[in-house]
Amino acid sequence: MKEQSFNTWFKPIKGNLNGNGKFKLAVPNQFVADWIQGHFSDIIEEAFTEVLGKPYEIEYIISSNDIEINGIKQTTLELSPQEKRESIRLSQQEQKFLSPHNLNRKYDFDSLVVGDFNQFACAAAMAVAEGPGLTKYNPLFIYGGTGLGKTHIAQAVGNAILESYPSKRVMYATSEKFTSDFIASLSDRSTYAFTRVYRDVDVLIIDDIQFFTGKESTQEQFFHTFNTLHHQGKQIILTSDRPPREIKGLEERLLSRFSWGLVTDLQAPDLESRTAILYKKLETEGTNLPDNVVKYIASQVSTNIRELEGALIRLLAYASVKEVPVDLQLAEKVLGDTLLYNKKTVDINTIQTKTAEYFGIEQEMMKAKKKTSDIVLARQVAMYLSRSLTSKSLKTIGNAFGGRDHSTVIHACDIISRKMSMDPTLRDKIDKISAALFY
């Protein structure tokens, strides 16, 4: 991370393991705990995994004085005057609505493949990232079909802003989270706290805005949130599966505001872009394929990026299980009929069943709240495969796993991707599960 961020949040703090899989960290107040959790949780998890072999749960100790934990002196964090004002301003009710910003650190501009299908949207997003709230692109409304990269671009803006402007507050939420937070505020009479949290931000990103359809009270609350932020010059970024005027069930006053800034769409990638996307995926996976194989896959899948990457995963899985090299003949054998004629589809339930079998657990555990290590790993693998091998949305996948939210699915996929790069045994197991789903 940047030196300034490290010196501000981590350098003054010490901590230690408590022997129960947790790491104690002394902080002066809840605001600091939420800030560290919201902005640095992925970095912390990566550090623990790299050094100690697994992530640890952080247990925050709120203390205004130096204390000792298991004989180790804990030095409290000195906040700047502005940060102290922030911590005072956030009441206990407001704290419950504060969660990690849910930005996936892998979603950045460097990992985006830019082509004719998304060039304008990416250019606008980069402009917003360089000057949030200062461009004419406010709100920035990005729409397109499933699997075309809306979430990636929206989160890339948020990550770039946090990198360039560490003091800015970025909030990413799905429309489902915004709605559930609002309902929760109504149930315990904390609406004022809810509004302060969602309106006291520099950048608000709402994913899948179309799911506000038919929710009149939520639309009313978002209308006022939108007005407040826009009036203050704060940046608003929205995504949807269709342009504003085609979203039925949203109030006219909201639809008109969505068009105040820039409305831009994402198209299905052309052949050259699909080829570039596959090369980028192979680079991420740390493997290579012959050029003619890559071009063959790109020519067979023209629907969306998710299905394109799914086809690549199926081919790699088959080759791994059969222990054969990948060439054009194998690609045609594995993917030819599957993609063009008799495309075998796989659903989330089947993925859960096969994954449970391979890990030796009951399928019901995929939806349960139980968090033993073997069940959590199996559940995360099933989420990863559901994301890779189906075109279902993150919300749909989360619902299929016991009503878990959008961010949980992203987190699971991120963890499994990292573990696969470090653990050949896990990668082999996932390859075998993938192959079993299709052959």
Image (spheres, grey):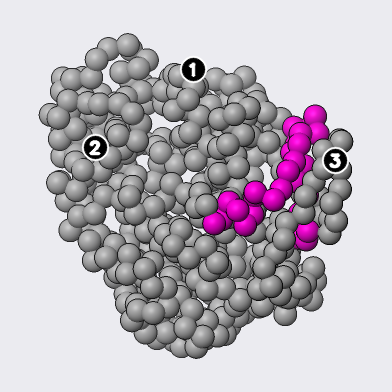
- The part of the chain drawn in magenta is 4-30
Which label's residue is closer to the chain start, 1 or 3? Answer: 3
Which amino acid type is marked by label 2? Tyr
Q: Residues within 10 Å of mark 2 (few under 14, many from 20)?
A: some
Q: Return the residue nearer the eye: 85 or 306.
A: 85
Q: Return the residue nearer the eye: 305 or 360.
A: 305
Is 412 left, or right, of 237 in this rendering? right
Kindly identify the residue that appears in the image at 71 percent across and 75 percent down: 85
Q: Residues within 10 Å of mark 1 (few under 14, many from 20)?
A: few
For residue 15: magenta?
Answer: yes
Across and down, in percent, residue 124 comes to 30, 69
Q: Residues within 10 Å of mark 3 (few under 14, many from 20)?
A: some
Q: Helix or strand or loop: what does disc 1 sit on? A: helix
Q: Helix or strand or loop: what does disc 2 sit on? A: helix
Q: Which residue is mark 1?
A: 425
Do the numbered discs 1 and 3 sit on residues whose CB atoms are within 8 Å?
no
Q: Which residue is mark 2?
A: 279
Location of residue 160 with respect to 246 vertically, above or below: above
Res. 236 visible in picture: yes
The residues tagged by marks 1 and 2 sit, at their Cα atoms, a distance apart of: 24 Å
For residue 271: magenta?
Answer: no
Q: Which residue is mark 3?
A: 69
Do the numbered discs 1 and 2 sit on residues whose CB atoms are within 8 Å?
no
Across and down, in percent, residue 257 comes to 42, 84
Which amino acid type is marked by label 3? Ile
Kindly identify the residue that appears in the image at 59 percent across and 67 percent down: 178
Q: Return the residue nearer the eye: 435 or 282.
A: 282
Which amino acid type is marked by label 1? Thr
